[in-house]
Image: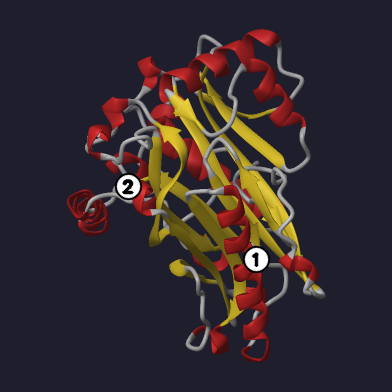
């Protein structure tokens, strides 16, 4: 049996990337998640089917209501690729050293966790509005922020306790329910892990008012490596919203990925109930590639959402569908350039 088709149940290394090379179970979000670690070519399509069959077997064994798989597929194999028993959810074309391949998301969801057709229609309407609206560009708010004493800094595990207490407060305001623990001690532990990078904004009073986290994964695929970045954990303090802080922080983080980390692709999974969460990605040059249905435990501040959670399936009203926004490094350089002082 292919060693990647191991259906052992375990908690993946982190909730964003998931289990690498196998499948794992995430209890809080009631999902099975895995990443296949060989490039799928026309000659290896059967290997993907075997891997997916093992993911489905673990899903059935645990009674999980959601399964998500990811794989790198050679573009010559895409037309023939069978994602069964799953369906494709997002196909992200790569470039540069990976220009002949795509990062593919595929999965399934149980009937009781499925949104109604009316809700799906409303979710599509949000994306359509974002894609057809005029964006303001990545840096429209930079002069205002820099001239009014806001400072961007990298966050780390050695921050003073008051900063972690402040971060806990910001995340509590932003997310009534979340897939991971965001208490002060848990945030400190997250910042101490080597794959985690975070940035924050301080006001001129010295208080943290916004934060963002990165999951940086270097995934070995045969004799090559994919450098995958996932941006998430976006949060802004209530008294500082609608000032452009979140977009400015995302732009700075993308600059870091291009100039310091040498990424291949960046992915943002945005709350599909929130127009603002999606427009921020569009104005920074990321492209929309699909939606992951009720993907994980995540409930945002109701003020940021335009679809009532009462319309979501019973038992899953604190879960969110996530729109997949992504961009390869070379295309992103057309939008992202240094702001203010170099990193």
Q: Position of residue 46 (x, y in %)?
A: 64, 84
What is the number of the mark on residue 279?
2
- Mark 2: give few (<14), some (14-19) or many (20+) Cα within 10 Å: many
Residue at image position (71%, 17%) is: 159
Q: What residue is shown at x 29% (from left), y 27% (from top)?
A: 302
Q: Which mark is residue 54?
A: 1
- Residue 169: % across, % down: 51, 14
Q: Is residue 258 visible?
A: no
Position of residue 119 in the picture relative to residue 110 (left or right): left
Which quadrant of the figure contains the N terminus?
Answer: bottom right
Q: Is residue 165 above or below residue 253?
A: above
Q: Which residue occupies 60% across, 69% down?
A: 52
Mark 1 and mark 2: Cα distance apart in space = 37 Å
Would you say residue 202 is visible in this rendering? Answer: yes
Q: Which mark is residue 192?
A: none
Q: Is residue 72 left or right of residue 118?
A: right
Residue 209, x across and y down, in percent: 49, 20
Q: Quadrant of the C terminus?
A: top right
In primary-sequence order, the first of circles 1 and 2 is: 1
Percent coordinates x, y for residue 6 in the rendering: 75, 62
Whether tag 1 and tag 2 are in contact, CB under 8 A, the answer is: no
Residue at disc 1, secondary structure = helix
Instruction: Estimate how packed mark 1 is, as few (under 14), some (14 to 19) or many (20 or more) residues with alpha carbons within 10 Å.
Output: some
């Amino acid at each position: 049996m292919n060693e990647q088709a191991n259906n052992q149940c375990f908690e993946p290394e982190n909730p964003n990337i998931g289990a690498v090379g196998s499948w794992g179970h995430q209890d809080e979000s009631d999902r099975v998640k895995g990443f296949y670690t060989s490039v799928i070519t026309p000659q290896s399509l059967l290997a993907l089917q075997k891997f997916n069959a093992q993911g489905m077997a673990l899903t059935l064994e645990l009674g999980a209501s959601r399964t998500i798989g990811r794989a790198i597929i050679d573009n010559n194999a895409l037309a023939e690729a069978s994602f069964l028993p799953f369906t494709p959810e997002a196909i992200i074309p790569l470039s540069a050293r990976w220009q002949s391949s795509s990062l593919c998301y595929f999965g399934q969801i149980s009937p009781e966790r499925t949104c109604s057709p009316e809700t799906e229609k409303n979710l599509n309407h949000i994306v359509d509005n974002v894609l057809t609206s005029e964006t303001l560009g990545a840096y429209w708010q930079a002069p205002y922020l820099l001239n009014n004493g806001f400072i961007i800094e990298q966050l780390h595990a050695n921050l003073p306790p008051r900063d972690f207490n402040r971060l806990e407060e910001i995340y509590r305001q932003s997310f009534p329910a979340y897939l991971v623990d965001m208490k002060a001690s848990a945030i400190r532990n997250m910042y101490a892990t080597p794959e985690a990078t975070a940035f924050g904004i301080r006001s001129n009073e010295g208080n943290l008012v916004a934060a963002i986290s990165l999951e940086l994964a270097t995934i070995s695929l045969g004799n090559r490596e994919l450098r995958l970045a996932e941006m998430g954990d976006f949060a802004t303090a209530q008294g500082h919203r609608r000032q452009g802080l979140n977009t400015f922080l995302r732009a700075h983080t993308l600059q870091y990925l291009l100039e310091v980390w040498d990424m291949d692709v960046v992915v943002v999974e945005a709350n599909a109930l929130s127009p603002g969460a999606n427009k921020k990605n569009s104005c920074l040059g990321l492209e929309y590639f699909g939606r992951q249905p009720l993907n994980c435990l995540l409930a945002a501040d109701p003020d940021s959402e335009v679809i009532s959670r009462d319309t979501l399936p019973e038992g899953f009203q604190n879960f969110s569908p996530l729109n997949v926004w992504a961009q390869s490094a070379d295309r992103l350089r057309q939008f992202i350039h240094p702001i203010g002082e170099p990193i």
